[in-house]
Amino acid sequence: GQQVMQIPQYQHVQEGEDFTTYCNSSTTLSNIQWYKQRPGGHPVFLIQLVKSGEVKKQKRLTFQFGEAKKNSSLHITATQTTDVGTYFCAASGGSNYKLTFGKGTLLTVNP
Amino acid sequence: NAGVTQTPKFRVLKTGQSMTLLCAQDMNHEYMYWYRQDPGMGLRLIHYSVGEGTTAKGEVPDGYNVSRLKKQNFLLGLESAAPSQTSVYFCASQSHGYYEQYFGPGTRLTVT
């Protein structure tokens, strides 16, 4: 089945530093989604990428989908303590209703 | 508009006991899902449903059963709980034609 590998597993940064998490697949993805889960909370949808080479921005967050649609990244500029949580990528292969989640990257921010 | 709700929030079971987790959504979504989340393992799909009266197996279905008798409800059953089923369980729903999944607050289950 569909597999997505996410790295790193953990990242600790000082507030104000940048952060990037990467998601890779051995197969071509039809789309990729990113979710954020705050400690003790539930996953919350952030964004979806569909097109090859797509780049989307949400304030300090930049999301990219690779040209070959096999990888994606989430970059946070100038992290804040509110960015703390686990970031998951999730991909659907052929269907638009079944997702495979990466194992997530836990981001901690030192104020 | 409550979104996705899950009952109960916490539960402790002894090995061999059974229980049912209830998920309800008020968004008229067609698709519903049950995931389990374990440390370092991300979210793994247990079972899912693409419509009322239909269910299908996900990545880790063994030891679980599900039912979707009403569109708004998706039940997850454990017939004979095992310590390996200690986990946080999340329900999610999704509207047909859209990609975003909406998650419930989770149920923390401990099996001793």
Image (cartoon, coloured by chain):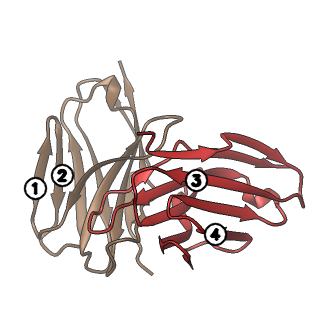
Chain colours: A brown, B red
Q: Tell which tag, 3 or 1, sits nearer the viewer.
A: 3
Tag of residue B67: 4
Tag of residue A63: 2
Tag of residue B23: 3
What's the residue type where badge 2 is placed?
Phe
Picture residue at 32% right of the left edge, 32% below the top: A83
Helix, strand or loop under label 4: strand
What's the residue type where badge 1 is placed?
Val
Picture residue at 70% right of the left edge, 69% below the top: B64
- Read off the chain for label 3: B
The mark nearer the N terminus, 1 or 2, is: 1
**Where's residue A53, x and y in %?**
9, 66
**Where's residue A43, x and y in %?**
43, 46
Tell me the quarter of the picture where residue B29 sits: bottom left
Residue position for label 1: A55
Disc 2 from disc 4: Cα separation: 37 Å
